[in-house]
Amino acid sequence: MPQLTYLEAIRQGIWEEMDRDPTVFCIGEDIGIYGGAFKVTDGFIDRFGPERVIDTPIAESAIVGAAFGASLTGMRPVAEFQFMDFIGCAMNQISNMVAKTHYLWGASAPLVLRGPSGGNVHGGPFHSQNPEMWFVHNPGLKVVCPATPYDAKGLIKASIRDNNPVIFFEHKYLRSPRQSADRTRRTRHQRDHLRSDGAHGSRSRGASREGRDRT
């Protein structure tokens, strides 16, 4: 099987979902002609056009608001933050609006908020944070942090098909190593969530290998 980097696997997963489902579109800063800060969406605008690959101003709250509104109409937006450090600029939208939709009136909000996080790449204090813990205790949100290219591809596809809002963190330090992203071998998490009808599955969890630190 072809060997992919972490970002190549994410790029491939989003591309395949946009090919499969016309309601999937991308929105974010410099994701169109420029192809994104880390080139995840490079070439997308040529394949899918500007109506499905939408460049925005540098305004995280506006990006989330637009994606959220689109999701309520039946679209499946994949919104990109150039750096997840700035997701805090949209905290009210995410925590008080996106996360609560299901509980308020039972509506689905199938959107993915994705972007690079983490340090050890000389990014400085404003481009090196891991803010996932801001959201894991917020009811109504699913937080995904894939560790390998294999996991990244399967989980980005599962996240896009999920009828609930998903925040997808892509650690910058994991970008380089190559690995097979063959989806014929899925984790239990991916099998439960990656369903052809787009419905979300059970949140089953299990140990990936035997160990002595679990009871």
Image (cartoon, rainbow, N blue to C red):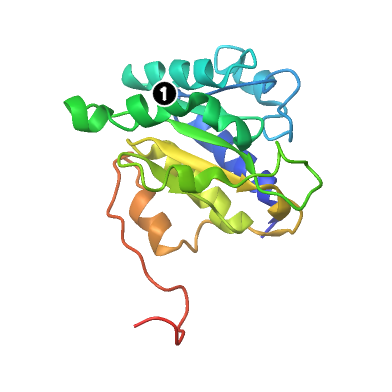
How far from the left and from the top, in percent, is residue 50?
A: 61, 12
Residue drawn at (35%, 64%) of the image = 205
For the C terminus, give its image quadrant.
bottom left
Residues packed near mark 1 inside 10 Å, few (<14), some (14 to 19) or many (20 plus): some
Instruction: Tell me: 126 left or right of 66.
Output: right
Q: Quadrant of residue 68?
A: top left
Regarding residue 103, the answer to whether it shows in the image is: yes
Amino acid type assigned to the residue bearing label 1 in the image: Gln
Q: Give the x, y percent position of residue 76.
A: 42, 26
Q: Secondary structure at mark 1?
A: helix
Residue name at image x 71 percent, y 28 percent: 36
In-front residue for pair 145/179: 145
Q: Nearer the viewer, residue 80 or 94?
A: 94
137, 45: nearer the viewer? 137
Q: Is residue 194 left or right of residue 172?
A: left
The x and y percentages for residue 173 are 72, 53
* Whether residue 158 can be seen here: no
The structure residue drawn at horizontal position 65% and vertical position 21%, both measured from the top left corner, is 29
* Residue 125 image offset from top left, x and y in percent: 73, 40
Residue picked out by circle 1: 93
Q: Residue furthest front?
A: 125
Image position of 192 with respect to 78: above or below: below
Query: In the picture provided, is 209 more to the left or to the right than 82?
Result: left
Looking at the image, which residue is at 77% across and 41% down? Answer: 124
Q: Quadrant of the N terminus?
A: bottom right
Q: Nearer the viewer, residue 95 or 154?
A: 95
187 w.r.t. 87: above or below: below
